[in-house]
Image: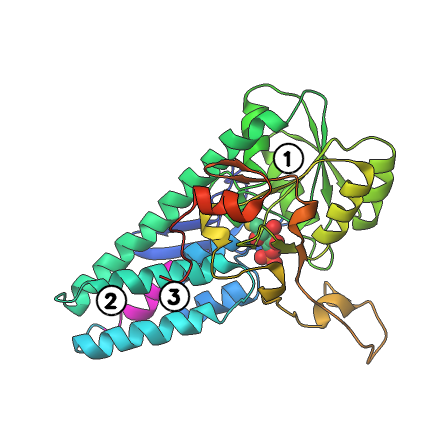
Amino acid sequence: MVETPGKYAGKIPQTIRWQDGELYLIDQTRLPGEVVEEQQRSVEQVRDSIKRLKVRGAPAIGIAGAYGLVIALRDKLHLDRGAFIEEMRKQAGYLESARPTGVNLRWALRRMLKHGDGLTDASPEQVLQALLAEAIRIHDEDRRLCRNIGKAGKALIKEGMGILTHCNAGSLATSELGTATAPMYLAHRDGVSFRVFVDETRPLLQGARLTSWELLQAGIDVTLICDNMAATLMAQGKIGLVMTGADRVAANGDAANKIGTLGIAVLAHHFGIPFYVAAPSSSIDHDTATGKDIPIEERDPEEITHWGGQQTAPDNIKVSSPAFDVTPNELVTGIITDKGILHAPYIEAIQARYPQNRATP
Ligand code: MRU
């Protein structure tokens, strides 16, 4: 484990790093208290890091999964080609099962499989090298997708505006600028002065622990609020724009994101505030027709009944713990993508911009 306290001060954190043939992830469960990178030594460790949210955010878990597949296969080079390819499929399925809602994990792993399967005459060593190159491409591409989202969305941010965001769709959830935060980083760089209100995001506090931390590092004006304060701020006229990320955008524009996003979208609609979802092409799923078809992850009840080792609810209380909800497309003012801002009707808009973005190759 590499301790890196203070390393990222004043910078945008790099949550995933591949260096000298090894994968390092910032352990996000320890933020903001300490910035600690953890080396990932086995596929089981990578899957566990995804499952336990050490690495989280849809694009980041896709990238981590792609590198995880390389780690899974690097000690399988003694297998003959057929057995190696079979192992590749098995390990991809194992990694994919870590989290069901964010489509990027499935998208990245199926892209890796397609790449490996396509190398019909290659030896296991050659397939492994090609898979590593593909994982690095997925990682690099995500940087570009986030920058393009930033360029597409930054004009939405006006001088003096208050912006509300939920969960963390920031650099910690991607490879660089984030999705919902990318327009903020670019507008800030361009000298626009605005203010971001960050929902704390119960139960795991991604807003409080992660988004407020990373926006502060970048010098952006951040105010942390409890999830139940959004309506009041909107009623007071303090919010001019809502921007969130997405774990999966269905073919009709319905968008799954962190639990609580739907409530904010309903509030924004009530108060006449624009509600934008930021999502890269890797989060758009043509194979899922509507939000009703998106599998919603149910998390461990202890994430609600306990905090920091302390029990915060009675013994044996019944708990419901969906990690995500789905915002129907009619509540979405626009989807900020790497190819510009999409508007309703979303089926047509998505088809026009992403005609071949099949999540299942
Ligand atoms: O459970 P998490 O922390 O992985 O949930 C993350 C979110 O809901 C993000 O908003 C989403 O993945 C978009 S990240 C660019």
Q: In the rendered structure, which disc, 3 or 2, sits on the residue that comes first in sequence?
A: 3
Point out the stretch of residues depicted in magenta. Answer: 66-76
Q: On residue 41, which mark appears?
A: 3
Amino acid at circle 3: Arg
Q: On residue 216, which mark appears?
A: 1
- Examine the rendered structure and indicate whether residue 357 appears above or below residue 321: above
Mark whose residue sits in front, 1 or 2:
2
Amino acid at circle 2: Asp
Mark 1 → mark 3, Cα distance in angstroms: 32 Å
Residue displayed at 70% across by 51% down: 261
Q: How is the image coloured?
A: rainbow
Q: Residue 171 location, x and y as percent?
A: 53, 43
Q: In the rendered structure, which disc, 1 or 3, sits on the residue that comes first in sequence?
A: 3
Examine the structure image and report whether residue 79 is included in the region drawn in magenta: no
Q: Which residue is mark 2?
A: 117
Mark 1 → mark 2, Cα distance in angstroms: 44 Å
Q: Residue 281 location, x and y as percent?
A: 45, 47
Residue displayed at 55% across by 20% down: 190
Q: Nearer the viewer, residue 54 or 147?
A: 147
Circle 1 Cα neighbour tier, 10 Å, few/some/many (<14 / 14–19 / ≥20):
some
6 sits left or right of 20 in the view:
right
Asked whether the residues under the numbered discs 3 and 2 touch, taking CB atoms below 8 Å apart as contact, a structural biologist would say no
Task: Respond yes or no on whether mark 3 lies under 8 Å from ligand 1.
Answer: no
Label 2: state its secondary structure. Answer: helix
Examine the structure image and report whether residue 68 is included in the region drawn in magenta: yes
Q: Residue 309 location, x and y as percent?
A: 73, 67
Q: Residue 214 location, x and y as percent?
A: 60, 40
244 sits left or right of 263 in the view:
left
Amino acid at circle 1: Leu
Label 3: state its secondary structure. Answer: loop
Asked whether the residues under the numbered discs 1 and 2 touch, taking CB atoms below 8 Å apart as contact, a structural biologist would say no
